[in-house]
Image (tube, rainbow, N blue to C red):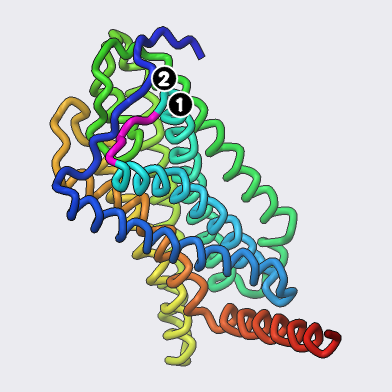
């Protein structure tokens, strides 16, 4: 990375307001962070230990939970610490690391959501061929593609952003290192080196969204042909929440990244950024897994197994 910057640290302005408001914001972020840790941690544990959940759907959920944890952990601890200590500085290296992890997690999440829509399409539209279409090799390749593609995209964004010049202005009007705001304070004449990757990434995101929409058009068309009302209800219950999260995640991310980068950041922009940083990791465990009957059964097995081990340990003592 050819860094010619004279700036050694940045200042995250975050949410403006008095100490009481800062404390409230830190409390909300902490609660959502802990709930995301607990929910996604449970998903990873249950889907790893329960052999009945070693299927493509739960394999992608496990990967999704890993990236959810990475996304929210890259931002929230630093944001809460800044709010409570009134020290909003972040080093150049920490800022670059935060950008890399946020872009990596967000891109991987979108790719995995796309893979999950393809999995649901195969399960509902081609149930007889599902095991052939979504075999172990296919799932591993799709997950590996999500990991490596998001890593490459994140590396390109990070290198192009931090190879720009930062000549004095170091105040970022966000609660984390956000690429549009970093571009806004750059004094480099070659700012298009990062704007072009953002536009290319937006096109790629749009392609993923079109793939998801197309999958669900076929899915809903197939669901309507199911004679059983109970079968239709079960199919809809697994598809509609997925569509809701995809729409929320993409709409807020698009608005945050495609708004004019030289405009002033409003309170609404901060809320939108908080939506795509906080909501997917917090809501995904509830929407995709913890409302799922198989996941509840897996959780019961885990609790019973833990209680049984504790009881045997007490008897031994």
Label 1–label 2 contact, CB within 8 A? yes
**In the image: residue 161, left or right of residue 47:** left
Quadrant containing the C terminus in the rendered view? bottom right
Q: Which mark is residue 158?
A: 1
> Is 16 or 100 nearer to us in this picture?
16
Task: Point out the residue furthest to the front here.
Answer: 317
Residue 72, horizontal then vertical, whole percent: 44, 51
**In the image: residue 128, left or right of residue 233:** right
The residue sitting at 33% across, 42% down in the picture is: 82
Is residue 217 among what the camera can see?
no
Question: Quick one: SS at disc 2?
Answer: helix
Q: Which mark is residue 169?
A: none
> Is 222 or 25 nearer to us in this picture?
25
Is residue 42 among what the camera can see?
yes
87 is within the stretch colored magenta: yes
42 is within the stretch colored magenta: no
Task: Point out the residue furthest to the right here.
Answer: 316
Residue 179, horizontal then vertical, whole percent: 34, 30
Instruction: Point out the stretch of residues depicted in magenta.
Output: 86-90
The residue sitting at 67% across, 79% down in the picture is: 302
Distance between the Cα atoms at labels 1 and 2? 6 Å
> What is the quadrant of residue 8 in the picture?
top left
> What is the quadrant of residue 63 in the picture?
bottom right
Residue 182, horizontal then vertical, whole percent: 30, 25
Instruction: Name above or below for residue 309 compared with residue 277.
Output: below
Q: Which mark is residue 162?
A: 2
> Is 260 or 16 nearer to us in this picture?
16
Determine crowd level at label 1: few under 14, some 14-19, many 20+ residues with C-alpha closer than 10 A: many
């Amino acid at each position: 990375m050819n860094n010619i910057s004279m700036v050694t640290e940045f200042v995250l302005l975050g949410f403006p307001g008095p100490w009481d408001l800062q404390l409230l914001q830190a409390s909300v972020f902490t609660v959502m962070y802990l709930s995301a840790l607990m929910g996604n941690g449970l998903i990873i544990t249950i889907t790893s230990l329960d052999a009945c959940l070693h299927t493509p759907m739960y394999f992608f959920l496990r990967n999704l939970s890993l990236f959810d944890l990475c996304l929210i952990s890259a931002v929230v601890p630093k944001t809460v610490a800044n709010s409570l200590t009134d020290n909003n500085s972040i080093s150049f290296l920490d800022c670059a690391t935060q950008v890399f992890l946020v872009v990596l997690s967000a891109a991987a999440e979108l790719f995995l959501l796309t893979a999950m829509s393809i999995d649901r399409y195969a399960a509902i539209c081609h149930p007889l061929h599902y095991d052939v279409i979504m075999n172990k090799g296919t799932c591993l390749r799709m997950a590996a593609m999500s990991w490596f593609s998001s890593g490459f995209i994140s590396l390109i964004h990070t290198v192009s952003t931090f190879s720009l010049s930062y000549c004095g202005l170091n105040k970022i009007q966000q609660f984390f290192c956000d690429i549009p705001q970093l571009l806004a304070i750059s004094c480099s004449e070659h700012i298009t080196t990062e704007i072009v990757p953002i536009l290319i990434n937006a096109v790629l995101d749009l392609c993923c969204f079109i793939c998801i929409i197309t999958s669900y058009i076929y899915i809903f068309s197939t669901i309507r042909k199911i004679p059983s009302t109970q079968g239709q209800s079960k199919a809809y219950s697994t598809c509609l929440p997925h569509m809701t999260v995809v729409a929320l995640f993409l709409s807020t991310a698009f608005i945050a990244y495609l708004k004019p980068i030289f405009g002033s950041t409003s309170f609404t922009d901060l809320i939108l950024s908080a939506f795509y940083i906080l909501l997917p990791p917090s809501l995904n465990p509830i929407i995709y897994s913890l409302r799922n009957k198989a996941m509840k059964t897996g959780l019961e097995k885990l609790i019973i197994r833990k209680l049984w081990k504790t009881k045997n340990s007490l008897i031994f003592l």
